[in-house]
Amino acid sequence: MMIISLAAHGQQDSTLDRQLATIVQKDSITVLVTDSGLGGLSVCAAVDSLARVTGRYPQMRLIFANALPESGSGYNRMKSLDEKVRVFDAAIRGMVGLYHPDVVLIACNTLSVVYPLTSYAREAPMPVVGIVTMGVDLLEEELRRDPGSTGIVFGTETTVGAGTHKRLLMERGIPSDRIATQACPELAGKIERDARGEGVQEAIGQFAGEAVAKSGASAGRIVAALCCTHYGYCAGFFHAALAKRAGADVTVLDPNVRMSRLLFPDDRKRPSASPEVSVQVVSRAMITSEEILSIGTLLLPVSAPTAAALRCYELKRELFPFSSE
């Protein structure tokens, strides 16, 4: 198991909080959302919706930049942690250099555990926010609220292998026997291709069964955190599968929701009556029509502009340099 410390992030929590407190008072803001695929588009869509409803920012430029270097070259398929770090370091440098954001949201658990190891993390001039701590916060809150509950972290192989969620929960005083982790190989890709397909439901059922058996939960409440941004699209499937296999009360937590609200604190800033919000989707890797249909259908009820931006995404090979060697 690889152990990654978020302390290497390059910004202490207090510094990050101060930076964000300044940014959220701006009238014009550029937000870069990134993921190692299309799961983070759910965060992008929610931010777009909140920006239009709240009028928090008179002007917001929202860019979703896919950090996938090539089709079929996902981070979980890379041979080593060093390769993941090298590729994402180049990716975030390229994205920031092109779009000069005020804030970067890493809407991806895999990349959030990789980012602290990049050289860019030590020199980033703007706040770069990973989603891992949001999932940890949600789990801690629920596990403390119900001492008889058991937590399950669902994630990719990289996320679960890093052990970051469980380690941080244990550092906060949650006993290790109350936290189970479950890797879900290939599930993110299946969701991108057909989020409502039988293959996705079958895979979730299998992973839910493995997780329940591993957790030892038989009667107490189960609190499941979906620690891959793709999984939020299928929260209902996770809930049904867990409830069926555990025979217990189930709560499903989606960290995507908490991340999307980060830039919309509840203060007294005067809202804009007619905010100007733009959404752009760019990708170095080709996005297939199958993926656009699957994910776009899910985005549409939340943010029609984000769904439209996905349909008209910009294929940008110069988004960042990439070599498979």
Image (spheres, rainbow, N blue to C red):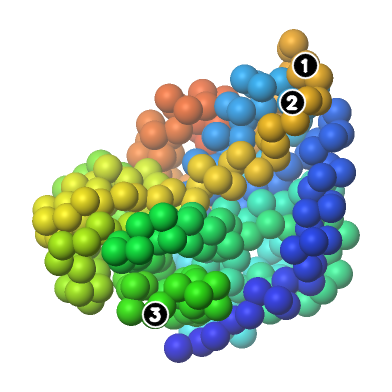
Of 166 and 115, nearer the camera is: 166
Quarter residue 117 falls in: bottom right
Measure the alpha-carbon separation of dots 3 and 1: 47 Å
Q: Is residue 135 above or below residue 74?
A: above
The answer to whether residue 98 of the structure is visible from this angle is no
Across and down, in percent, residue 74 comes to 48, 67
| Residue 272 visible, this angle | yes
Label 1 and label 2: CA atoms lie apart by 6 Å
Q: Where does label 2 land, which residue? A: 56
80 w.r.t. 223: above or below: below
Question: Which of 247 and 3 lies nearest the eye of the viewer?
Answer: 247
Q: Would you identify the image quadrant in which residue 112 lies?
A: bottom right
Quadrant containing the N terminus in the rendered view: bottom left
Which residue does the image show at 52% across and 27% down from the upper left? 303
Q: Secondary structure at mark 1?
A: loop
At which x and y percent is residue 152? 33, 65
Circle number at residue 272: 1
- Would residue 303 be found to the left or right of residue 230 on screen? right
> Mark 3: which amino acid?
Ser
Do the residues bearing badges 1 and 2 touch, measured as CB atoms within 8 Å? yes
- For the residue pair 290 and 180, the one nearer the viewer reads as 180
Q: Secondary structure at mark 3?
A: helix
Residue type at the position of mark 1: Ser
Q: Amino acid at mark 2?
A: Arg
Q: Tell me where residue 250 appears, x and y as whole percent.
A: 25, 51
Mark 2 Cα shell of 10 Å, populated few (<14), some (14-19), many (≥20)? many
Q: Which mark is residue 316?
A: none
Indicate whether 281 appears above or below 112: above
Foreground disc of the pair 3, 1? 3
Q: Secondary structure at mark 2?
A: loop
- The residue to which callout 3 is attached is 176
